[in-house]
Image (cartoon, helix red, strand yellow):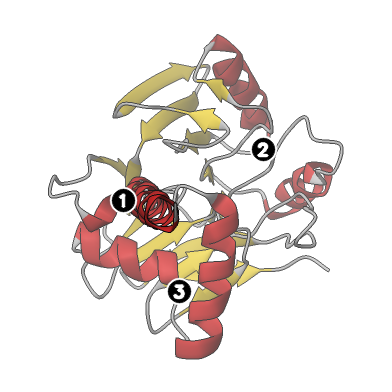
Amino acid sequence: MLQLLYALLTLASALYTLLLLAYILHNFPWLLDREKLVVHQVTLKKSDQPMVIVSDLHFGSSRSVYRYLLAILRAVKPRTLVIAGDLVDERMLMSERTLRLLKTLTICAKNVFYTPSSSNHDHAPKPTFISLEENGKRVAIASPILKLCVEGCSNCLYITHGDYASRNGVIAHFLEEFVQRLFLKPFIGVVLRKKLGISDGSWVVYGHSHKAWSSHAWRAVNTGCWVSRIYESTQMALAVATCRNGVISVKLLKPS
């Protein structure tokens, strides 16, 4: 009887270990992924107006405060607006509804780009690039990575949701906080820079972990979130990028 119990416990332990390993490999796809991520490059004309990057707006959630963002955008008046994933709160595939929602944001910027997640609320399972122009306004969806360059600037912006580093947003949140506190490094930013082979001068901008944070040393910016969760408060933030003297610089703004 004891031998049978021991055998069952050993089997259960082995199954648990296999399931845990399978989940780790699923949640952190970069551990085994040898293929290059698809990067969609867009080059913009140089402008004195800034580029603004935000993420995790979660339209449709009762806890979202995205209305504050709309007021900020009217004040900043960016030429280009990029939303780095989780535009809506409900889980859904890219659709005409998404395009209609993006078109409404052209009242805030001439160019509106969207980099949906590959595993979260706004699911885009395959590499995608869709660009529509109407009445001098441009709306584009680029998944999984948008490389935004400006004419006359030596560096670029790599923009993505960030779930490639960790599909589970809660795990990403606590990993980002732990690595930042212990090593003063952005977990997602480091993974993305190494996986994409981003040059030292270019920036990586992302969201997903809901941790508003920036590092000039790592050229990495996390644009926080516009919704509260049980384990975190709202961390409203937006990245403002400008090209001066041939170099794109990025600042993280946190509205109070």
Distance CA(mark 2)–CA(mark 1):
40 Å
Name the residue at 31% across, 51% down.
Answer: 25
Place residue 107 in its image quadrant. Answer: top right
Q: In the image, which is nearer the foreground, mark 1 or mark 3? A: 1
Q: Position of residue 223 (x, y in %)?
A: 58, 60
Distance CA(mark 1)–CA(mark 3):
21 Å
Q: Position of residue 145 (x, y in %)?
A: 33, 44
Q: Does residue 232 appear to the left or right of 185 in the view shown?
A: right
The residue singled out by tag 2 in the image is 108
Name the residue at 46% across, 36% down.
Answer: 119
- Given residues 38 and 243, the one toward you in this image is 38
- Could you tell me which secondary element the residue under label 1 belongs to? helix
The residue singled out by tag 1 in the image is 25
> Residue 186: which numbered mark, if any?
3
Place residue 2 in its image quadrant. Answer: bottom left
Looking at the rendered structure, the kind of residue marked 2 is Cys
Q: Position of residue 158 (x, y in %)?
A: 34, 55
